[in-house]
């Protein structure tokens, strides 16, 4: 992972594929199930376009703050080497001398500007292009641009100007001044510079971006207001201050790009660059121009700068700062320094690192496309909305795992149409289910009303029966009792009944004598048992029948006063014999009827009433 510049946080990624569309070289691999996107470091050119495109900040670059502090804390000399875009990045700092002092407060022992290095490099370019020997060059100032050529246009590597970047030139100057006894931290707008530094071991010891520097200022609470002024360390630059503007370097190098007399063309931003490189490859003999190239819209818009500031504002800040610096520059000293450091070698070389997707014959590419796109049944439109130049290119990338058909808008339209159809079907199912539920709920409500009416009617009838009826639950608490039962228990119970009608909730244990209570206890715990016994209770002879109602663990009890004057003893004896079984089954049915239909309840009630109102015929007595 050492050279892995950008990474994707899979926990944040929402697989929108915006990064795949944005990546100019298709360096993002799609994992299983079209998820777990990964940036392939060998293919990545560090342009940062994926990070900019990501709507959920799932992409970030390798930070080097720890590396920087390891150098500072080592106790030796450590120089900060500042790219001239500082004026565009830190407009909130009122004076560059405060900025310089803020860097010293971080712990840097020396603070240099890169602009002098730009001037050195500019002179080299001037010589190279002036000594034109029939070969057209592409500037190698932008590390991302250099990676783009090395990886995707390897045949153009010989056309890269063999001159080191201002970062390298400045680091060489600083190391020379301090006899190599100083560490160098480059601070700039470019993320790919972190990889560029690795091409020159021991020269640039760490690279942090402006965004990282802001983080450091914030963490250490370093503010200009509390600090003194301090200038950068010499040597100072001149027109090199214009370097962050994409044509600024040409001005520093005194290279004309005028249309009629100029010898160079400036191209910036990935799409233009790729198109330029394609043309350069095929038509340079007709184009006849050198190219000054930047991946960004000039370094002042680099991926290591704070997002959101407008290009024109940044450009104007760079120009104002350059004017100020050049006005205060001692030109004699500057010339002297150019002479002094002109023997520093700025020669460099580049090598091919071909990452092009292998050539696939057209017919095979078409087959791949058809295979990927078999459901689409649409022609190759080459609409480029996916970020590829053609459907064929996209198909090959899918084949190599570098893309997914999901990023194709047409394919998506098809998928969306399918999903819409599925959703519609689901919605219809849902509506039907809902209607059925509403209907069954209405039926259930109706059934509940009927059952309630039946129950009310049943209880109203039982309430007036001439014998006591009581229902108890499993905890032996009364859930219902009629008037005859309350009267039978006596005055205390009648008083309670006035407060709690039907004695609901009362424990039968507290109301009945122990021998009768024990019978309730027995049936409650043994639902298959039933009791039919006579008990003496308060000068009365009671016939008590207790039975399980089999529903809701209810137990019912019927209390008949066999001493009632209107009932002859013989009648009692006969009816006891005849009615016991009837009563038992009928009152059980009463219990079962709770919650059943009104018609059935009525039938049962009539049966009960009939049974208990019926006067026995003479011959039966
Ligand atoms: S940094 Fe540039 S090249 Fe690398 S993955 Fe992101 S968009 Fe692609
Ligand atoms: S842009 Fe790329 S990394 Fe960001 S959420 Fe979308 S798919 Fe994921």
Image (cartoon, helix red, strand yellow):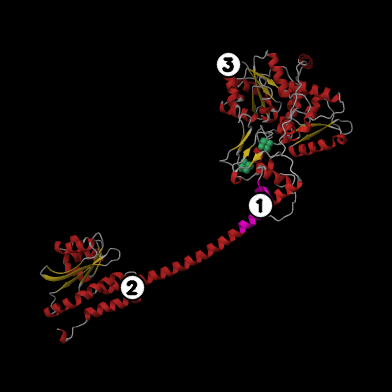
In the rendered image, which quarter is residue 284 located in? top right
- Can residue 48 be seen by looking at this rendering? no
Percent across and percent down for residue 215 are 59, 29
Q: Quadrant of the C terminus?
A: bottom left
Residue at the extreme right: 260
In the rendered image, which quarter is residue 216 located in? top right
In the drawing, what numbered circle is on residue 75?
3
In the drawing, what numbered circle is on residue 45?
none
In the foreground, 344 or 123: 344
Report the residue marked by disc 2. Answer: 454
Name which of mark 3 and mark 1 comes first in the sequence: 3
In the drawing, what numbered circle is on residue 412?
1
**Image vertical order of residue 148 relative to residue 384, above or below:** above
**Mark 1 closeness class: few <14, some 14–19, many ≥20 residues within 10 Å:** some
**Mark 2 closeness class: few <14, some 14–19, many ≥20 residues within 10 Å:** many
The residues tagged by marks 3 and 1 sit, at their Cα atoms, a distance apart of: 58 Å
Q: Which residues are magenta?
A: 404-420
x 25%, y 80%: residue = 610
Tell me which secondary structure the magenta stretch mostly adopts: helix
Ligand 2's quadrant is: top right
Q: Are marks 3 and 1 in contact (CB under 8 Å)?
A: no
Name which of mark 1 and mark 2 comes first in the sequence: 1
Q: Secondary structure at mark 3?
A: loop
x 62%, y 24%: residue = 224
- Can residue 577 be seen by looking at this rendering? yes
């Amino acid at each position: 992972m050492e050279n892995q510049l950008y990474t994707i946080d899979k926990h944040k990624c929402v697989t929108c594929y915006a990064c795949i569309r944005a990546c100019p070289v298709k360096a993002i691999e799609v994992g299983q199930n079209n998820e777990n996107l990964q940036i392939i470091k060998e293919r990545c050119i560090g342009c940062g376009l994926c990070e900019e495109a990501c709507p959920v900040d799932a992409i970030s670059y390798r930070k080097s703050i720890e590396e920087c502090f390891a150098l500072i804390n080592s106790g030796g000399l450590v120089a900060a080497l500042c790219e001239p875009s500082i004026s565009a990045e830190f407009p909130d700092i009122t004076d560059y001398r405060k900025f310089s002092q803020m860097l010293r407060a971080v712990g840097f022992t020396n603070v240099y500007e890169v602009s002098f290095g730009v001037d050195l490099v500019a002179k080299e370019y001037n010589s190279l292009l002036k000594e034109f020997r029939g070969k057209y060059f592409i500037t190698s100032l932008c590390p991302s641009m250099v990676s783009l050529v090395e990886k995707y246009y390897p045949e153009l590597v010989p056309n890269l100007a063999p001159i080191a970047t201002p970062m390298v030139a400045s680091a060489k100057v600083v190391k020379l001044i301090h006899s190599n006894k100083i560490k160098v931290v480059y601070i700039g707008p470019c993320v790919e510079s972190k990889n560029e530094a690795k091409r020159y071991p021991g020269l640039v010891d760490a690279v942090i971006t402006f965004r990282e520097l802001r983080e450091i200022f914030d963490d250490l609470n370093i503010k200009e207001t509390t600090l003194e002024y301090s200038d950068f360390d010499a040597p100072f630059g001149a027109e090199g201050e214009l370097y962050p503007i994409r044509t600024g370097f040409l001005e520093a190098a005194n290279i004309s790009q005028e249309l009629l007399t100029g010898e160079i063309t400036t191209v910036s931003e990935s799409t233009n660059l790729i198109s330029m490189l394609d043309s350069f490859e095929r038509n340079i003999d007709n184009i006849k121009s050198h190219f000054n190239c930047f991946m960004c819209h000039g370094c002042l818009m680099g991926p290591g700068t704070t997002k959101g500031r407008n290009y024109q504002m940044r450009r104007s800040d760079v120009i104002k700062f350059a004017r100020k610096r050049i006005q205060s520059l001692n030109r004699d000293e500057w010339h002297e320094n150019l002479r002094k450091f002109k023997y520093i070698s700025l020669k460099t070389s580049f090598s091919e690192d071909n990452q092009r997707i292998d050539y696939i014959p057209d017919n095979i590419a078409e087959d791949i496309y058809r295979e990927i796109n078999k459901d689409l049944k649409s022609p190759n439109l080459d609409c480029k909305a996916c970020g590829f130049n053609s459907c064929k290119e996209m198909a090959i990338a899918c084949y190599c795992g570098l893309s997914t058909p999901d990023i194709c808008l047409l394919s998506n339209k098809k998928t969306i149409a399918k999903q819409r159809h599925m959703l519609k079907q689901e919605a219809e199912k849902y509506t039907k289910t809902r209607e059925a539920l509403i209907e069954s709920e209405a039926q259930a409500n109706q059934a509940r009303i009927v059952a309630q009416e039946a129950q009310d009617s049943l209880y109203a009838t039982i309430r007036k029966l001439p014998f006591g009826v009581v229902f108890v639950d499993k905890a032996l608490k009364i859930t219902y009792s009629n008037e005859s039962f309350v009267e039978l228990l006596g005055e205390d119970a009648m008083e309670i009944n006035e407060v709690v009608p039907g004695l609901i909730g009362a424990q039968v244990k507290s109301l009945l004598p122990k021998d009768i209570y024990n019978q309730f206890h027995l049936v409650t715990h043994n639902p298959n048992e039933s009791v039919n016994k006579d008990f003496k209770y308060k000068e009365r002879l009671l016939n008590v029948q207790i039975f399980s109602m089999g529903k809701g663990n209810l137990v019912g009890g019927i209390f008949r006063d066999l001493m009632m004057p209107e009932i002859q003893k013989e009648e009692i004896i006969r009816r006891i014999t005849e009615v016991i079984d009837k009563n038992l089954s009928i009152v059980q049915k009463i219990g079962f009827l709770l919650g059943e239909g009104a018609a059935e309840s009525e039938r049962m009630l009539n049966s009960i009433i009939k049974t208990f109102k019926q006067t026995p015929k003479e011959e039966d007595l």
